[in-house]
Amino acid sequence: MADLTPIEQLIVKSMQELGATKDTSIKTADDIAKKSNRPKSLVTNTLVTLTQKGVIKRVAREKAAGYYVIGQ
């Protein structure tokens, strides 16, 4: 996680604390925003960046997309 920015590290840590570490326990941006105590817009933008970096995976669903940390 050394190449991640402080906010990216915070989001990944929050996801790990929520247990979002496999595709059967995904969390929404709302869940992650509440846990990290950061604005949802910031969390959403960070989730996109983390997905592009291959750190997390996005799962499209009917309502809100879910996310989980890869390779934990």
Image (cartoon, rainbow, N blue to C red):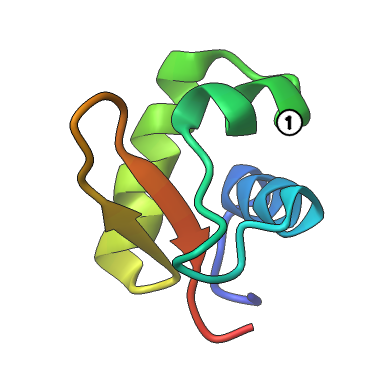
The part of the image, by quadrant, that contains residue 63 is top left
Image height check: is 2 above or below 42? below
Which quadrant does the N terminus fall into? bottom right
The local secondary structure at tag 1 comes to: helix
Is residue 36 rendered to the left or right of residue 30?
right
Is residue 24 rendered to the left or right of residue 16?
left
Is residue 10 rendered to the left or right of residue 45?
right
**What residue type is disc 1 on?**
Ser
| The residue positioned farthest toward the bottom in the image shown | 71
Q: Position of residue 14 (x, y in %)?
A: 73, 46
Is residue 4 rendered to the left or right of residue 17?
left
Residue 14 versus residue 45: which sits nearer the camera?
14
Q: Residues within 10 Å of mark 1 (few under 14, many from 20)?
A: some
The part of the image, by quadrant, that contains residue 16 is bottom right
Which quadrant does the C terminus fall into? bottom right
Residue underneath mark 1 = 36
- Residue beneath the point at 58% across and 54% down: 5
Q: Position of residue 67 (x, y in %)?
A: 43, 51
Image height check: is 29 above or below 50? above
Residue 37 versus residue 3: which sits nearer the camera?
37
